[in-house]
Image (spheres, helix red, strand yellow):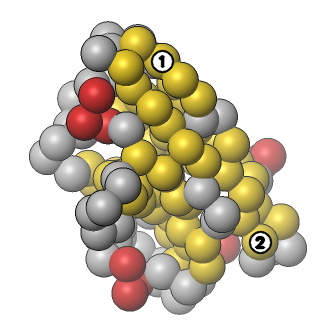
């Protein structure tokens, strides 16, 4: 599968953005999906994940109650709705897909088989 993330941009603190990730090659229902981010000079970190059928989600503590991950199996898309953005959310955001698991969500990079190219989110103070 190929993943392509989009929707990044410049937003003021307190604002919102919605990232999208489109999957091609196989139906998106075939994968558990996740979002990760990497700020300049830092390691990539987990943001949010959703199970294969979309019934389970998980979030990093730093984004809980502000970000929402969702999955549109019919249109092969996964979304990350980001509200109340903070300057510390500034990073390149990546979507990723796990091809093997039928159940559960995953917060480790090594659990993912495919990665998109990333989209930059910049939050100004």
Q: Are marks 1 and 2 in contact (CB under 8 Å)?
A: no
The residue furthest left is 61
Q: Position of residue 20 (x, y in %)?
A: 64, 42
From the image, tell me which residue sits under label 1: 11
Q: Nearer the viewer, mark 1 or mark 2?
A: 1
SS for callout 1: strand
Q: Quadrant of residue 86?
A: top left
Q: Position of residue 35 (x, y in %)?
A: 45, 56
Q: Position of residue 84 (x, y in %)?
A: 30, 17
At 35% across and 53% down in the image, what residue appears?
A: 39
Q: Work out whether 61 lies above or below 65.
A: below
At 53% across and 58% down in the image, what residue appears?
A: 94
Q: In the displayed structure, does residue 97 sit left or right of residue 67?
A: right
Marks 1 and 2, the one that precedes in the sequence = 2
At 21% across and 51% down in the image, what residue appears?
A: 60
Q: Position of residue 57 (x, y in %)?
A: 34, 52
| Total count of labels | 2
SS for callout 2: strand
Dot 1 alpha-carbon crowd within 10 angstroms: few under 14, some 14 to 19, many 20 or more? some
- Residue 43: assigned label: none
From the image, tell me which residue sits under label 2: 2
Q: In the displayed structure, does residue 24 sit left or right of residue 17?
A: right
Q: Work out whether 101 lies above or below 58.
A: below
Dot 2 alpha-carbon crowd within 10 angstroms: few under 14, some 14 to 19, many 20 or more? some
Residue 55 visible in the picture: no
């Amino acid at each position: 599968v190929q993943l392509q993330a989009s929707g990044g941009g410049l937003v003021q603190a307190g604002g919102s953005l919605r990232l999208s990730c489109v999957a091609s090659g196989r139906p998106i229902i075939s994968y558990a999906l996740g979002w990760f981010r990497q700020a300049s000079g830092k390691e990539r970190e987990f943001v949010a994940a959703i199970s294969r059928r979309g019934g389970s989600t998980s979030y990093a503590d730093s984004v809980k109650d502000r970000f929402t991950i969702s999955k549109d199996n019919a249109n092969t898309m996964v979304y990350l709705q980001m509200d109340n953005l903070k300057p510390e959310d500034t990073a390149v955001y990546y979507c990723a897909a796990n091809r093997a698991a039928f159940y559960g969500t995953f917060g480790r990079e090594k659990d993912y088989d495919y990665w998109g190219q990333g989209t930059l989110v910049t939050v100004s103070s």
